Image: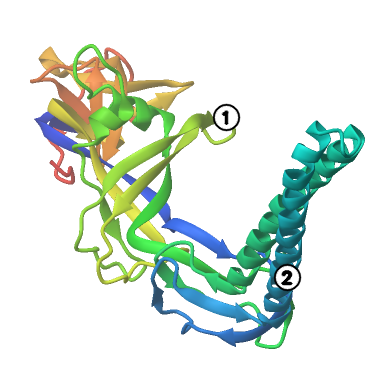
Amino acid sequence: MVQVTGITRKNLPIYGNWVGTLEGYQNARIQPQVTGYLIRQDYREGSYVRKDQVLFEIDPRPFQAALDQAKAQMAEAQAQLVKTTLDVNRDIPEARAKAIPQSQLDNDRQAQLAAKASVAAGQAAVERASINLGYTKVRSLIGGIAGIAMVQVGNLVGPSAVLTSVSQVSPIKVYFPISEQEYLTIAQRAAPGTVDFLSAASSIPLQLTLSNNSVYPYRGRFLFTDRQVDPQTGTIQVVGEFPNPSRLLRPGQYASVRALTQMLKNALLVPQTAVTQLQGSYQVTLVGAGNRVHVQNVQVGPQVGSLWVITAGLKPGDRVVAEGSQKVRDGETVTPQPYAAGDR
């Protein structure tokens, strides 16, 4: 005796479910560009900061002194330029009148060129000293959530030190791997003549389930994919984007990502117990005329609950053995009973 069921036929949505990691849309490590002692922290850790907001201050006195010195040296160079210019202007008519040797005028002109170069160097030194003085106020490169300070007031810091990090979290990114098969399935939904994953995926909303099993109220979208499939895992990294107006989502969180990857039209489904796998092939046992059984090779699709999609090898109206197929042989006559446990 075997339990027999018909084939379920219906439109079937296929969902992909992946484990994702949240990351800031932009992330900036805040590092000073000059070396000095930290004298002030100007932000509250964990708070939102604006772009260019001052986060830390380094003792500006050495840099102010360097700027003052550079300005004084430039003023000296400018005075020397004025003197050499007067010398040249005085000696030109005298050299023409042969009152002084031409070599003296040449020397004056060389001194004038050297003075001009000194003024240019002085201007560059003033600009550099002014920039360094400005760097004593360490600013945020982006707007976002500022993390915990990694240094304390009084520490000597330099360009290699990380003072804190800032992450833009609205919107926020989610990174998750999908299989190569899922990638191709979505990409092939693109418009005829094109096979482009993002074109096809742009209309597919993403759903996020948080670690407490609550469903995030905002829908996300596919943003971009990595350039290659990981040969070790057979997956490709995909990045999605979610609105985060309340800044509830934070970098480093884990979440489940779900999306409708395919809609199977008039899909044929049988109980998973009806399918036998043998050396890489799949078979079902059919009950035909006179209750005679026949082993049929099939091709399978995704599993949905307790059912299995059959993509080839069956047709509507076929009856399959859902329980007991291992007890019968091909061509044998059976006594079929209805299959009551199927999820149809």
Q: Amino acid at mark 2?
A: Ala
- Rendered position, 47 above or below 231: below
At x 57%, y 63%, the residue is 29
- Number of the front mark, 2 or 1: 2
Q: Where's residue 34, x and y in %?
A: 69, 68
Cα distance between the residues tagged 2 and 1: 64 Å
- Residue 340: quarter of image: top left
The residue to which callout 1 is attached is 231
Which numbered disc, 2 or 1, marks the residue that appears first in the sequence?
Answer: 2
Per the image, the residue denoted by label 2 is: 72
Question: Residue 156 in the image: x percent, y percent?
Answer: 75, 79
- Residue 46 picture location, percent across and down: 45, 79
Q: In the figure, 157 relative to 241: above or below?
A: below
Can the viewer see residue 324? Answer: no
Depth check: give the residue in front, 75 or 98. 98
Q: Which residue is drawn at the image coordinates 85% and 36% (left, top)? A: 106
